[in-house]
């Protein structure tokens, strides 16, 4: 039986996946990311997660998102991990340094604070979720710009004003929305009851399905060969062909591959490569010389990036098989179970007020799993 | 629940606003630093068959086709040099590496010229060719 702490972490990890699902359902340009999946991290700090719990939750969130999105072995996972870990560390440090003041703490349940900021560095100041969210976004975006330089080349620095500027705005909005939700959430009040997680017991686990090992091994060998070839060749045609083979392999196993993200990846990577001109000048756009070798280099980089994405999709279990890939009763299994419950309930609810719909969905999901109700 | 009972506030304070403004200022500063990081020194190579541009931050060896044959340029340690050329006297090769904005080298018999500029645009090279550029060194013969 998992400890209460791990059950709590599993629930919040499921909330991260749920928020990620909500963000995907919002129509927006493919290059815009709002960061909804960070909202449960802010709520976790509000609920008083300790450092080990918060760190565990962050790692679980990054891993599960990589598995659900099929990006576990791709560059996107590396970026997500770098940004996620750095922003979580920054948010926790800021939270620890500034929150906990006995003056002006929001005690929604009317309780007195016990320590009055015993471990706080700046007890005179207290901050809200908006600031914590902004610090997390700023650090995450800065780290991701540095890391993406290895995949997209030095031209990525030219996009930094847009990335950092948009990050400040979106994190402000995210912090504000999370703040509003936490102020009025019945779900959060319920799970903060002292005895809640004592009674929040996992349902009996389903038996694991048997998989054929041989065809999986062949799949891994062939796709790994394509990926390695793509990485080590400098020939853009060969890297394109390897990437195409991996795409065909994904489609043949009935994995969904959306066209727009693929097209956007190629366009973005080539555009960024143009900022470092090389080779024959084809034409000029103002100060920017569009050069032949830069285009080829951009195409090669995009094929490498896409090949890691397709490789990841091929190896990672499909969304409806993910739960059965984990050991029953484990933290990851429990997280997927909660996520499945919450997402199924979400589509059944009809409230027009989005906050009410989210809150009631979460409350109903935990009631189903708790022996208190 | 955290045993210390500490929590984040759910109301925005003056400190939040000040912190946001400081973070925004830091964002602007870093954005400018990042965006101008790509600004560098470029080698514009003009030939009868077209123009080429290379950033001196990216090392490499390239063969450029001139009027009668190939001219090989090498970019290393932020400088560019002509290492091989079709011409008989190899004056362009003996000039060595150039790296400062405004410097110039050429293999005139083969029609290949190399200019160092601070802009990746081909317009800067055309300014030097027409003599309207700010700095134009004497042509090597």
Image (cartoon, coloured by chain):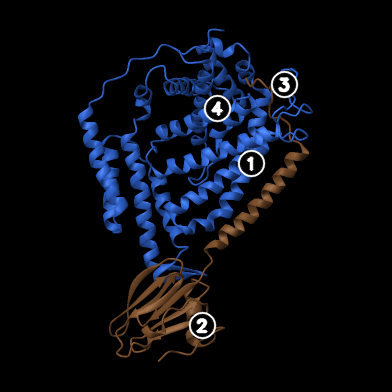
Task: Give SS at disc 2.
Answer: helix
Q: Are marks 4 and 3 on the same chain?
A: yes
Measured in 3D between alpha carbons, the distance from the residue under mark 2 to the one under mark 1, in whole angstroms, is 46 Å
Q: Are marks 1 and 3 on the same chain?
A: yes
Task: Give SS at disc 3.
Answer: loop
Q: Are marks 2 and 4 on the same chain?
A: no
Measured in 3D between alpha carbons, the distance from the residue under mark 3 to the one under mark 2, in whole angstroms, is 69 Å
Q: Viewed as shown, does residue A148 lie left or right of B24?
A: left
Task: Give SS at disc 4.
Answer: helix
Residue B66, position as x, y percentages in the image: 32, 82
Measured in 3D between alpha carbons, the distance from the residue under mark 4 to the one under mark 1, in whole angstroms, is 22 Å
Q: Which mark is residue A108?
A: 3
Q: Residue at x 55, y 27 (%)?
A: A52
Q: Residue at x 41, y 11 (%)?
A: A204
The numbered mark, 4 or 3, whose residue comes first in the sequence reads 4
- Note the chain letter of the blue one: A
Chain bearing tag 2 is: B
- Res. A140 in view: yes
The numbered mark, 4 or 1, whose residue comes first in the sequence reads 4
Q: Which residue is mark 2?
A: B127
What color is chain B drawn in?
brown
Q: Which mark is residue A134?
A: 1
Badge 4 density bin: few <14, some 14–19, many ≥20, Cα 10 Å: few
Is there a contact, CB below 8 Å, between mark 1 and mark 3? no
Q: Which residue is mark 4?
A: A52
Disc nearest the viewer among 4 and 3: 4
Chain bearing tag 1 is: A
Measured in 3D between alpha carbons, the distance from the residue under mark 4 to the one under mark 3, in whole angstroms, is 25 Å
């Amino acid at each position: 039986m998992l400890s209460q702490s791990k059950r709590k972490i599993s629930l919040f990890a499921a909330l991260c996946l749920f928020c990620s699902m909500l963000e995907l359902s919002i129509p927006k340009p493919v290059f815009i990311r709002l960061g909804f999946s960070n909202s449960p991290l802010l709520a976790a700090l509000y609920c008083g997660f300790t450092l080990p719990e918060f760190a565990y939750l962050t790692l679980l969130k990054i891993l599960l998102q990589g598995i659900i999105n099929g990006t576990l072995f791709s560059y996107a996972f590396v970026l997500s991990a770098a940004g996620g870990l750095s922003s979580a560390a920054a948010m926790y440090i800021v939270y620890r340094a500034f929150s906990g003041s006995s003056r002006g703490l929001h005690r929604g349940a009317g309780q007195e604070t016990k320590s009055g900021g015993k471990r706080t560095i700046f007890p005179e100041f207290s901050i809200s979720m908006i600031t914590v969210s902004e610090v997390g976004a700023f650090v995450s975006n800065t780290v991701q710009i540095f890391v993406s330089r290895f995949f997209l080349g030095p031209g990525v620095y030219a996009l930094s004003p847009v990335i950092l500027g948009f990050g400040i705005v979106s994190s402000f909005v995210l912090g504000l929305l999370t703040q509003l939700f936490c102020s009025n959430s019945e779900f959060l009040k319920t799970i903060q009851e002292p005895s809640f997680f004592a009674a929040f017991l996992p349902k009996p686990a389903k038996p694991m399905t048997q998989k054929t090992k041989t065809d999986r091994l062949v799949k891994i060998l062939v796709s790994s060969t394509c990926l390695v070839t793509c990485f080590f060749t400098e020939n853009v045609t060969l890297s394109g062909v390897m990437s195409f083979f991996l795409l065909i392999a994904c489609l043949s196993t009935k994995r969904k591959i959306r066209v727009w993200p693929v097209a956007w990846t190629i366009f973005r990577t080539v555009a960024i490569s143009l900022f470092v001109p090389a080779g024959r000048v084809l034409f000029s756009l103002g100060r920017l010389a569009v050069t032949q070798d830069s285009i080829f280099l951009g195409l090669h980089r995009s094929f490498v990036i896409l090949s890691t994405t397709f490789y990841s999709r091929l190896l990672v279990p499909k969304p409806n098989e993910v739960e059965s890939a984990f050991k029953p009763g484990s933290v990851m299994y429990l997280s997927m179970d909660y996520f499945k419950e919450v997402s199924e309930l979400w589509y059944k609810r009809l409230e027009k007020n989005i906050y009410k719909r989210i809150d009631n969905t979460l409350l109903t999901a935990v009631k189903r799993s708790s022996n208190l109700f | 629940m955290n045993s210390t009972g500490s929590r984040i506030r759910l109301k925005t304070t003056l400190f939040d606003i000040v912190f946001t403004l400081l973070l925004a200022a830091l964002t602007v500063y870093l954005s400018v630093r990042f965006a101008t990081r790509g600004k560098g020194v470029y080698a514009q190579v003009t030939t009868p068959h077209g123009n080429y541009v290379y950033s001196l931050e990216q090392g490499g060896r390239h063969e450029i086709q001139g009027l009668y044959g190939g001219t090989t340029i090498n970019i290393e340690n932020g400088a560019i040099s002509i290492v091989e050329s079709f011409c008989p006297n190899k004056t362009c090769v003996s000039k060595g590496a150039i790296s400062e904005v405004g410097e110039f080298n050429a293999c005139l018999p083969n029609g290949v010229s190399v200019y160092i500029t601070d802009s990746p645009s081909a317009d800067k090279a055309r300014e030097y060719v027409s003599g309207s550029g700010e700095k134009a060194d004497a042509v090597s013969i």
